[in-house]
Structures are given as C-alpha cells and as structure tokens.
Image (tube, rainbow, N blue to C red):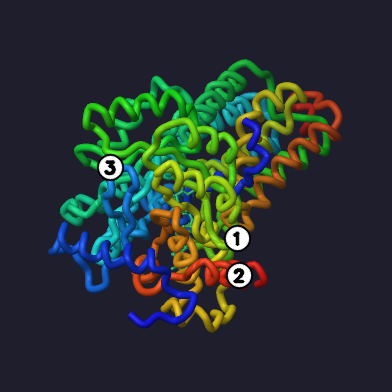
Amino acid sequence: MSEWWTYRPSDFLLFSPRVYERLIEAHNAALWPFQPVGVLLGLILLVAVWRGRDGEARLALAGLGVIAAWVGWSFLGQRYAAINWAAGYAEVGFAVEAVALVAAGVVLRAPLATSNALRRATAILLIAVAVVAYPLLSSLGDRSLASAETFAFMPEPTAIATLGALATLRRRLALALGLVPLAWCLYAGMTLWTLGDAVAAAPLGAAALFLATLALGGRSRQVSGERLRSR
Amino acid sequence: MTSPRHVVTRRAALAGAGALAATAALRPSLAPAAAPLARPIPSTGEQIPAVGLGTWITFNVGEDRTLRDECAAVMEAFFAGGGRMIDSSPMYGSAQPAVGYGLRKLGRPDALFSAEKVWTSSGRDGAAQIEATRRFWDVPRFDLLQVHNLLAWEAHLETLRAMKERGALRYVGITTSEGRRHSELETILASTPLDFVQLTYNPLDREVERRLLPLARERGVAVIVNRPFRQGRLTEALEGEPLPGFAAELGATTWAQLILKFIVAHPAVTCAIPATTSVAHVRENLAAASGPLPDEAMRARIAAHIADL
Ligand SMILES: NC(=O)c1ccc[n+]([C@@H]2O[C@H](COP(=O)([O-])OP(=O)(O)OC[C@H]3O[C@@H](n4cnc5c(N)ncnc54)[C@H](OP(=O)(O)O)[C@@H]3O)[C@@H](O)[C@H]2O)c1
C-alpha cells in the first residue's frame, strides 16, 4: 500500500503504559513465588556458558527451548494477546524457536563453548543483563516493583539471554536460531520506546550487540570444555 | 436566545432545538439536563448527538477487571450525559469485549448507537468477523458497520449492503484517518451509496474541508470525525496555554471543548468521537455539544489561534 510511509511506530501501539504495566503485574502475581526459580535457572545458564561442558551446554540449550515454549504460551498467548493481537503471531514464533533450540541441544556437540573472546564476553554479558539486571531495570522509573520482568517468565529477558547463549555459536547457526529472539528484541524495544519506557534500551542494545558480535567477533571455533578449561 | 456576534449560526440553533425536542420525545427517561446538540443522519433523518465515544487504546484493557469497570464508568457517564454513538473496531485489541462488558453492566442502555467496523484483508472473512464482533457486544444487530481504513472495501461493502437489505444492519459506512487515501475515498464517496464516512478533522488537520466534507454534504453522507485531539497530542500540547477570550463567548471552558465546538460546527459534520479513559473528560466532551457553537468566522479564528500556538 502506498500510504505505508505515513505510519509511525506509535500508530501501531494499541494500549497505554498503564494497561501494559498492570498486565505484567497480574502475570507476576499469578505466578508468584516462582520468579526466583527463573533467576536461578538463568544463573545455571550462565555457569553452563562459562564452563562450556558438552552435556551441560546441550541441556542448557534445550532448556532455553522449553523456556521459550513456556514464555510464549503463558505470557504471549495467555496474557499479552488479549491487548495486542501481534502477540498471537509472536507466540507461534516462540514455539518454532522452542523446537529449534531443543533440536540444537540434541544435535550439537559442546554448543556453548567458544574460543573467541568477544563472543564469550557478549554471551556472559547478555545473560547477566537478562537474568540479574533486567528485573531491576524494568521496575525502575515510573514502573512498580510488582511489574519487574524476570528471565523464564517474560519474553524480553528470555530473548536477551537466548541471544547471549547463541552468540557462542557459528555465525550462520547463531543467526538462524537467533531470528526469533532478535525480532522480538526489536519489536519489544520499539513498543517500549513508544510507551516511553527507558528499558527499551536493553532489548534494542542486546540485539545490536548480538549482531555486532557476529559481525566483528570472527569465527566461533567450537572447543571442547576440557580444552577451554585447560587454557 | 441572545447570542454574541460570530457565535451561534441559525442552522446550529435550529438543529440544537430540534435535537432537544427529538431526544426528549424519543427517550424521555434518558434525556439529560442539557441534552447535547444532535444532528440528522442525512439518509434517514434520524437524530444523533454530535459527540460520541471512541475506544481506540482507551478501551483496550484486556481482562483487567478494575480497568473494565473504569471503562464502564466512562460509558455510564456518557449515556447519562445524553451520548449515543460508541465506535470500535476488531483492530482495537480487547476494546470490543470491554464495550460488551460495559453494556451488560449498564443493563443495555436503549440509547446506544453501535458503530463497528470490519477489518480484514479478505472479503470472504468479513461476515465471520462481524459475527464475532456482534457476540462481543452482545447486541442483536449493529446500527452502523464501517469498512475500516478502506481495507478490501469493495468486497466488504457488498457484504454490508446485503446485511442492510435483509435488516441485519441499519447503516453502512467507510473509514480512513490522518489524511490517508483521501483521493480514493473521494472516488468512493462520489460513486458509491453510503450512509456514513469517518475521517480525521480538527483545527490542525483541515485538508478534508477542501473536497471531502463538501462532497459528503452534497452526497447526503453523514460524517463521523475521528482523532479530534490527535490522539491526545493536541490537548496535551495546549495544556497550560491560556484559552482565548472568545472561548467564553462560546461557553467553552477548556481547549478540548473549544476544539470539539470547532469540529461539530462544520455544517457537514454529524458527530465527533473523542476517546477517553476519564469520566470528567467524557462529561466535558459531551458538554461541548451544548450551548453556542461558532459560526464560520469564529471557526477560522479558532483554527488560526491554535495554529499560531
Ligand atoms: N481509521 C479509523 O477508523 C480510525 C482511526 C483513528 C480513530 N478512530 C476512532 O476515533 C476515535 C477517536 O480517535 P483517537 O482515540 O485516536 O484520538 P482522540 O479522540 O483525538 O484522542 C484521545 C485522547 O484524548 C484525550 N482526551 C479525551 N478527552 C479529553 C479532554 N476533554 N481533555 C483532555 N484530553 C482528552 C484522551 O485522554 P484521557 O483518557 O486522559 O481523557 C485520549 O488520550 C478512536 O477512539 C476510534 O474509535 C478510527
């Protein structure tokens, strides 16, 4: 359609900041007190990337898949889709991502171990931001603590941590598996931006860092956990 | 009535008096203290209050019970103030079930004039979408169905016309907003029978004054004005600015009222549909449609003043 250029991101925003914040609060309240389990799982992911041991890393990747399915269904499908029909499509994307991550966990050898320092640093930084900083960042400013967003419960921290883990993979594989979390980070970042929420910088920054790392970080030579630790 | 210069046009005064009589005769129990000015729908002569209620963003509250009750309170104040037309769309997330919730809570007010839209790229999906929409509102039929943003308009207009013919719908319309696809809309207006057209008009977005509004008038098509406040950006920008002296002559106590008076005083406009989450604002908006309205010279002054700010 010829009039597409006349649209701004705000033309696609269907709800107010207040409605979105209350939606997250309701989601958190319904699942409390399990959010700390999400933080714990995130820390386990961080350790798995740090150590890069074959079995742990594969389990972590498959676990990310299960989490993607859960977050897609429980938040995107069951909650967010009520106020944003685009979330219904995203739920399908998260389901596809879930299958792909589980399959990658089954098939790949020592997936999260990389000899490339930049990739490794990006992975650890993104996962740490998603798991530790994001709940705090998302409840700063005008937002309530009850609307804090945790890894394994909300899509943004989950997508950011997933991009972190994927930053260790071979470029093409990382891009293919990163398509859904990348798209989500861009979409969510735009949405938060139009809502006037400064936390928008986190998903947008994560997407940029992931892409920059793949572009600049050179090849990710997969190394076995043993070799990684012996250096 | 003693009216200051440039304030009440004869047409507006007559329409206002007629409207008062009509609403009082139709629904004595619902007639508010100062009924808002009503305008005739050209294709039937039915009177409709010149201020309605939009639901974009404001009514998209999901399943949140507290917020749904707030929407219902806005609807309650709207009907109590003599309002009738509520406008929504399948595009507006959960606004449709929120309207349905409010209608049930208020015991299905007789005054309701239901204005909905069909918004799907395939003509074949139109009927199913309309039926889903009807179930959300839980009404036997809609007063008005509009093709949203001209999307697949030929196929949908066919569906709507067929519905109207068999009595499943009262009025047929088409919408656009923010100046999009005006030349196409003009062609449709000129060539296709319609009861309503919905478009954007306010003191800053005045392009429709040149062709579309005169054409709608000439073709006997009712005009619904969306985005009277540019989705709130206009009222926000004017916040804190002192109202011009002439606002008092019109009985406008806020910028929102001055803007609405500017809009509904245009001879081609049937009603404006501001959206709000606030009971105070819905009352304020309805009140803008009672009392004196600006004439052409005064309308020009309002537009110039706001453009200067
Ligand atoms: N293509 C289409 O078919 C189309 C496109 C656009 C719009 N529409 C229809 O037209 C309706 C109106 O357009 P819109 O919602 O985009 O924008 P709008 O009515 O111009 O603006 C709505 C905003 O104005 C504020 N507001 C309302 N009354 C006020 C008052 N008395 N004083 C100060 N602020 C006030 C509201 O905030 P508060 O909540 O704080 O009052 C709300 O944020 C829509 O809801 C929709 O039904 C149709």
Q: Is residue B2 visible?
A: yes
Which quarter of the figure is the N terminus of chain A placed in? Answer: top right
**Residue closer to the observer: A105 or A173:** A173
The answer to whether mark 2 is within 8 Å of ligand 1 is no
Task: Tell me the kind of residue under disc 2.
Answer: Ile
- The secondary element bearing badge 2 is classed as helix
At x 73%, y 33%, the residue is A167
Q: Secondary structure at mark 1?
A: loop
Residue drawn at point x = 44 percent, y = 81 percent: B4
Circle 1 residue: B204
Observer able to see residue A39: no
Which chain does the residue under circle 1 lie in?
A: B
Q: Residue A116, image x and y in percent?
A: 83, 33
The amino acid type of the residue labelled 3 equals Asp
Do tags 3 and 2 sit on the same chain? yes
Quarter occupied by residue A64:
top right
**Number of residue marks:** 3
Closer to the chain start, of discs 3 and 1, is 3
